[in-house]
Amino acid sequence: MSIVEEAPGYLQVFSDGSVKRFVPGIVPASPKPINGYKFKDVIIDPSKPVTGRLFLPSTPSHGFSGKLPVVVYFHGGGFCIGSTTWIGYHHFQGDFSAASQSIVLSVDYRLAPEYRLPVAYEDCYSSLDWLGHNVGSEPWLEQADLSHVFLSGDSAGGNIAHHVAIKAIQNNNCHVKINGLLLIHPYFGSEKRTEKEMVEGAAESVASNDMFWRLSIPEGSNRDYYGCNFAKAELSAVEWSQFPAVVVFVAGLDFLKERGVMYAEFLKKKGVKVVRLVEAVEESHVFHVFHPESEATSLLLRQMSEFMKSY
């Protein structure tokens, strides 16, 4: 049995189809509030299963008529790895809850290649249904304002947030009102290579991105699959006009920066009313996960909080 695909230190896929993931440090569920927030794990859909981690400011200030906005966050990892319980994700989302004075629901969706796209989109959309169905019975959602919901995520999670927003626009029965999207270093692609992907020295980064796409899109698809190539989205002009306000965060040292800029320009051309682009010039891909206590991450938290206050 041989290794056919590998992300060293994170993932190995074997010739028989089995998958081995190397889990970094995690934060187990705990009833004790820390650093201005408390958290607990919830089951979103036991049949799949889809789970999540709920973060709540431990001493919330009363805004929005005593209610708190809700952020639904989707972790990154090329659709193949990652978890809200990973140390970096946990601390960032807890700090985000405290900084933005919001309730954060971070979703653990099913991973590829065992569950290829669009499974992640469906799993993550189900978190909106869960909010709608549980807002009256879950004590931690007592202050949740479901008319003031934001979607966020990094890398593949940013991609997911985009597709969940589309699904919410096209579904007349959505239980929440999505006011904005906060995408951090979103992961998109296409069969056509960008300028940066064709320069000398890019081969390793291109190969890594291609591998995660091979593992996550439906077998027989290519990188022009709608989940990979945002230009393949099938929305009417009216639906694009209903797209929420968007802020796209990019990092100057991130190989995916170019795709993030292209995505923001695409939304503007489609008539999305509010599209902001914010760059962390000296930072690399998902720096907030690897360095949750850095000054750059603190700035990101402030920028995200300010965006939410505007919408």
Image: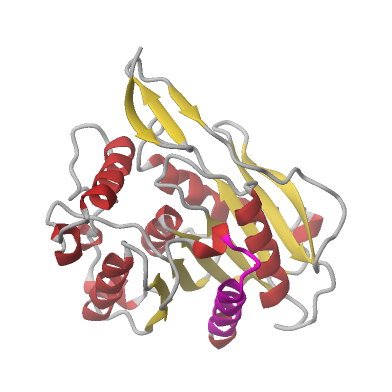
In the image: residue 106, left or right of residue 20: right
Please identify the quarter of the rendering in which residue 258 is found.
bottom left
Residue pictured at 66% horizontal, 76% vertical: 100
Q: Which quadrant of the figure contains the N terminus?
A: top left
Give the number of marks.
0
**Residue furthest out toward the top:** 1
Viewer-proximal residue among 154 and 70: 154
Viewer-proximal residue among 274 and 33: 33
In the image: residue 276, left or right of residue 95: left
The stretch in magenta equals 291-307
Residue pictured at 79% horizontal, 82% vertical: 62
Q: Is residue 234 magenta?
A: no
**Residue furthest out toward the bottom:** 310
**Residue furthest out toward the front:** 201
Residue pictured at 75% horizontal, 43% vertical: 28
Position of 85 relative to 16 (above/below): below
Q: How is the image coloured?
A: secondary structure
Position of 251 relative to 138 (above/below): below
Q: Position of residue 132 (x, y in %)?
A: 62, 57
Position of 265 relative to 255 (above/below): below
Res 148 seen here = no
Q: Position of residue 93 (x, y in %)?
A: 64, 62
Q: Position of residue 78 (x, y in %)?
A: 39, 47
Q: Position of residue 35 (x, y in %)?
A: 80, 66
Q: Is residue 302 magenta?
A: yes
In the image: residue 15, left or right of residue 74: left
Residue pictured at 48% horizontal, 61% vertical: 286
